[in-house]
Image: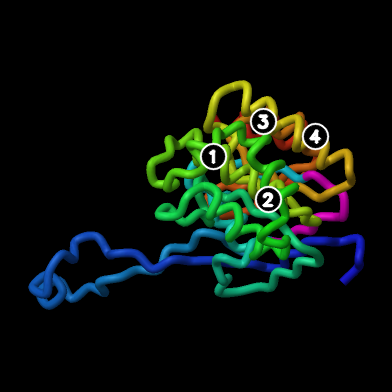
Amino acid sequence: MNPEILIKLENVSVSFWQNNLGIHSIKDLVTKRKNPFKNKPILKNISFEVKKGESMGILGRNGSGKSTLLRTIAGLIKPQEGTITVNGSFAPILAIGAGLEMELSGYENISLLLSLYGTARKNVNSIEEIKDFSELSDEVLSMPVKRYSSGMVARLAFSISLANDADILIIDEVLAVGDQGFQAKCMEKIYNIKAEGKTILFVSHFPEDVLKICDTAILLENGCLTHSGSAEEIGTNYKQLF
C-alpha cells in the first residue's frame, strides 16, 4: 500500500445477528417455524482511503453505522466481507470509559494502559501529564473508576488516550460529555495534534465541529457511504437529511 495512505477500506461489510421479533419461547419456535435469529446488515460495501496527515469526519444520523465503522477500523469488530489496511498505530477514543477497568483506581488504570501502549509503567512524566490534563485530583484518581461520574470517566479516558503518541487518532463523539471548559481544552489539543501532521478520524453529530477539525468527510446513511468530499460539502449534505 502507498505509504501516504494510512487507512484503506475495500468493500467492507458488517452485519450482526439479533433476536427475531416474535420468538420468545420454545413454543414460539415450534409453532411459528421462524428462525430465532436474523442477520442485520450494519455496514454495506464501504470503501474509502485516509491519507497521512488528513483529518476526516464521519457524519450520519443515529443508526447509520458510524460507531460500528470506527470499531471495525480499530479492530474491535471483524468485517464479514472486504479488507481493512491500517498503516500505523492508533489511539482510539471510542466510548466513555472504553478500555478502563471499573474496579481499578484511576492511577491503576493509567499504569495499566500506559504499559499496553508501550510506555514504561513508572514513567512519572506521562502519569503527571495525564493527571494535569484530566484535572482530576489525587483523591479522585485513587478511587475506583466505578465511583466516577460520566464526566470524570471521559476526562480520564481522553487524557490517557492522548498519552499514546500514535499516528492516527480515532474519536467517537466523546467530546459531547463533560463541562464546556474541558471540551474546549480537548478541542485545542486536537487542533495541536492536527498541526503536528497526525491523522484524525472524527465522528460527531455536529457538522460545525467536523468543519472545525476536518478537511474531508464522508456521509453514512443506512450503513451505506452515500457522499464523500470536503467537510463543508458533506456537512451541507448531512443537514439536508433532516
Image marks 1 and 2: residues in contact by CB distance under 8 Å: no
| Residue at the image position 60 percent from the left and 57 percent from the top | 111
User: Which one is earlier in the sequence, the residue at label 4 or at label 1?
Assistant: 1
Magenta segment's dominant SS is strand
User: Which one is earlier in the sequence, the residue at label 2 or at label 3?
Assistant: 2
User: Which one is earlier in the sequence, the residue at label 1 or at label 3?
Assistant: 1
The numbered disc on residue 231 is: none
Disc 4 from disc 1: Cα separation? 19 Å
Image marks 2 and 3: residues in contact by CB distance under 8 Å: no
Name the amino acid, label 4.
Tyr
Give the residue at the far top of this rendering. Answer: 180
User: Which one is earlier in the sequence, the residue at label 4 or at label 3?
Assistant: 4
Secondary element type, mark 3: helix
Secondary element type, mark 4: helix
Name the amino acid, label 1.
Ala
Residue 83: where, in percent of width, then height? 69, 73
Is label 1 or label 3 in front? 1
Disc 2 from disc 3: Cα separation? 17 Å
Residue 59: where, in percent of width, then height? 63, 41
Q: For mark 1, does the 10 Å Cα neighbourhood hold few (<14), some (14 to 19), or many (20 or more) residues?
A: many
The numbered disc on residue 170 is: 2
Name the amino acid, label 3.
Pro
Which residue is at the front of the view, 165 or 177? 165
Disc 4 from disc 3: Cα separation? 16 Å
The numbered disc on residue 154 is: 1
User: Which one is earlier in the sequence, the residue at label 1 or at label 2?
Assistant: 1
Specify whether residue 177 is painted magenta: no
Is label 1 or label 2 in front? 1
Residue denoted by label 4: 191
As drawn, is 134 to the left or to the right of 89?
Answer: left
Disc 1 from disc 2: Cα separation? 15 Å
